[in-house]
């Protein structure tokens, strides 16, 4: 049986995530409401000390219309990526 080993940069619980350093970047799903273009992933600078604070600093389009990144259901806490570690909350 495979052993799940969480990425060491992930927070093992929501409590640990709340106490972690603030993120410098936010990854945001972007989409065309008319569904004429593929969804995209926007990267926003969230570092208040950065000259680019609050602006889009990266953008990646998905390859196909209908990929529906906006329905993916991301979770804000990395503990969701390794269920056995979330019991330490």
Image (tube, grey):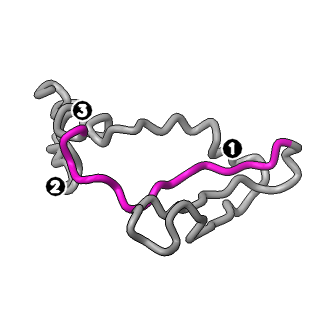
Question: Residue sitting at 63 percent across and 66 percent down?
Answer: 60
According to the picture, the residue beneath numbered tag 2 turns out to be: 8
- x, y (%) of residue 11? 20, 44
* Count of numbered circles on the image: 3
Mark 1: secondary structure: loop
Question: Residue sitting at 88 percent across and 44 percent down?
Answer: 34
> In this picture, which residue range is highlighted in magenta?
18-33
Give the farthest residue toward the bottom.
51
Q: Quadrant of the N terminus?
A: top left
Q: Is residue 87 left or right of residue 25?
A: left
Determine whether 22 is above or below 11 in the image: below
Image quarter of residue 50:
bottom left
Mark 2 residue crowding within 10 angstroms, few (<14) / some (14–19) / many (20+): few
- x, y (%) of residue 7? 21, 54
Determine whether 18 is above or below 9 in the image: above
Q: Which numbered disc flags the more N-terminal residue, 3 or 2?
A: 2
According to the picture, the residue beneath numbered tag 1 turns out to be: 68
Q: Quadrant of the C terminus?
A: top left
């Amino acid at each position: 049986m495979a052993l799940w080993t969480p990425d060491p940069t992930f927070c093992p619980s929501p409590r640990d995530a709340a106490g972690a350093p603030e993120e410098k970047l936010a990854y945001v799903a972007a989409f065309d409401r008319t569904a004429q273009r593929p969804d995209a992933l926007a990267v926003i600078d969230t570092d208040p000390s950065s000259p680019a604070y609050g602006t889009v600093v990266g953008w990646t389009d998905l390859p196909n219309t209908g990929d529906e990144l906006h329905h993916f259901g991301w979770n804000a806490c990395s503990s969701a990526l390794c269920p056995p570690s979330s019991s330490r909350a």
